[in-house]
Amino acid sequence: QVQLVESGGGLVQAGGSLRLSCAASGRSFSMYNMGWFRQAPGKEREFVARISWSTGITSYADSVKGRFTISRDNAKKTVYLQMNSLKPEDTAVYHCALQPSLRRNYDYWGQGTQVTVSS
């Protein structure tokens, strides 16, 4: 069983910054991609960013490109999301997710952390 635990959410004013963390734990699991997704009230969940665990190659949604940075610490099995220049429309519950291999989907999800950006 794999567990993903997020932390770092909170309330921030527009233009501010937050750093989210997601630590993975469990017995004998592989890590292909780690991703961040978010879901705002009344909206569908949307992709934010992902990082290849082996190469570190990253990908971002257009809405966060240039403002958010995803990174990883392989030894700690932790992925981070540095969020700068936050906007009210970034308000959402942010979830991290693990894709164990190329042939699988994001099978494991964290419980989510709330990010609220006030105007």
Image (cartoon, rainbow, N blue to C red):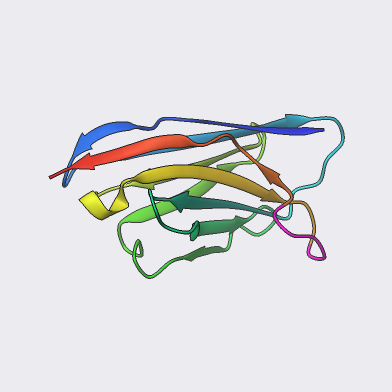
- Seen from the viewer's position, the closer of residues 24 and 41 is 41
**From this viewpoint, is residue 119 visible?**
yes
Q: In which quarter of the image is the C terminus?
A: top left
The residue positioned 35% from the left and 61% from the top of the image is 64
**From this viewpoint, is residue 85 visible?**
no
Does 105 appear in magenta? yes
Furthest residue toward bottom: 62
Q: In which quarter of the image is residue 101?
A: bottom right
Q: In which quarter of the image is the N terminus?
A: top right
- Seen from the viewer's position, the closer of residues 45 and 4 is 45
The residue range painted magenta reads 102-106
Furthest residue toward right: 28
Magenta stretch: dominant secondary structure: loop
Q: Is residue 45 left or right of residue 30?
A: left
Residue 36 drawn at (x, y percent): 52, 50
The residue positioned 38% from the left and 70% from the top of the image is 62
Does 89 appear in magenta? no
Q: Quadrant of residue 104?
A: bottom right
Q: In this view, does 19 lie to the left or right of 109?
A: left
Residue 5 drawn at (x, y percent): 59, 30
